[in-house]
Image: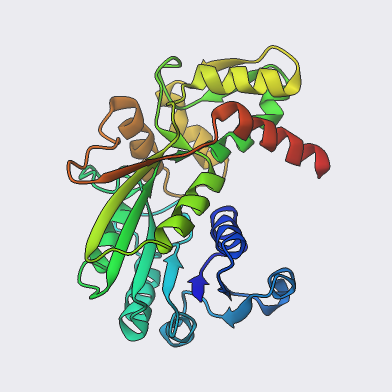
Amino acid sequence: MFAVTAITGRVGSAVAETLLKSRRKVRAVIRDQAKAAPWLARGCEIAVADLGNAGPLAAALSGVEGAFILLPPVYDAESGFPDVLPKIVVIREALHRALPPKVVVLSTIGADATEPNLLNVLRLLEEALADLPVAVTFLRAAWFMENAQWDLAAAREGVIDSYLQPLDRPVAMVAAADVGRTAAELLLEDWSGHRVIELEAQHRVSPNQIAAAFGKALGRRVEARTVPRERWETIFRDQGMRHPAMRMRMLDGFNEGWIDFREPNALRRQGRIGIEEAVAKIAEEACRT
């Protein structure tokens, strides 16, 4: 049996689906018992736990062949991540108590970047688990293609705003389904010690290509345009962010090239889904809702 955290999200559900298709048993680790029904129907065992208490999480991660760990995404954070550090402490304590023989931890491109930015939080998670005495894979995933869902409404009007710049510069990206599938496949492997695996799609993606993918999915012309950096802070604060600096520096990192895959000893995997397929799915899901 494999324990899967964040199973109700895009990545966690893809991890579970892949394991179930491989005829492996899954323990669904959820925060809310009310969301258990779909996974019970699939034959999963249910464990209720969250990142507020190490005890229930340790119990959920105990007695399994392996575990998938996902720290919830951080979008608006102060320098030093004071709101997130307690969650990392809970993950560390729970894993040290449970000691599942294999652990796949979702990390990120740029986890090794030293410049202060939003992705530093996953470097802190990696560092917190550095002494875990079991087999650990840190799966560093590229920029999620699903971030394009926030551009759908604008794409319907023919123009999407891009913070990734210049518009013709390709960036490492990957689809959430590929992240989940790869994480599950890694859980089914045997390895020892700690390792880093970098994951991106077969082809890097530029903002212009995202616009073209929207154009194909929507059946109309769509263009990308840059958002001047001097407007970022005002825009982000108007969107409700209290601490936009860390997000702005993350975007700088992608645009300036210091956030990228650069770990010399990392292993590499490739996703199967391209940007056209990912954007088509975004448009299709929006139509259904």
Protein image colouring: rainbow
Residue 233 appears at what percent x and percent y? 44, 35
- Of residues 202 and 50, the one drawn nearer to the viewer in this rendering: 202
Residue 68 appears at what percent x and percent y? 45, 66
Does 150 sit above or below residue 63? above
Q: Quadrant of the C terminus?
A: top right
- Of residues 233 and 204, the one drawn nearer to the viewer in this rendering: 204
Does 246 sit above or below residue 256? below
Residue found at the very far front of the displayed protein: 23
Which residue occupies 22% across, 65% down?
Answer: 193
Asked whether, in this view, residue 17 is left or right of residue 138, the answer is: right
Badge count: 0
Which residue occupies 51% across, 37% down?
Answer: 272
Does 118 sit above or below residue 148? below
Asked whether, in this view, residue 152 is left or right of residue 252, the answer is: right
Which residue occupies 21% across, 42% down?
Answer: 263
Q: Residue 136: which quarter of the image?
A: bottom left
Asked whether, in this view, residue 94 is left or right of residue 32, the answer is: left
Residue found at the very far right of the displayed protein: 288
Q: Residue 185: which quarter of the image?
A: bottom left
Does 187 sit above or below residue 258? below
Residue 238 appears at what percent x and percent y? 56, 39
Asked whether, in this view, residue 110 is left or right of residue 164, the answer is: left
Visible residue check, residue 247? yes
Which residue occupies 32% across, 42% down?
Answer: 268
Q: Residue 239: which quarter of the image?
A: top right
Visible residue check, residue 79? no
Residue 234 appears at what percent x and percent y? 49, 34
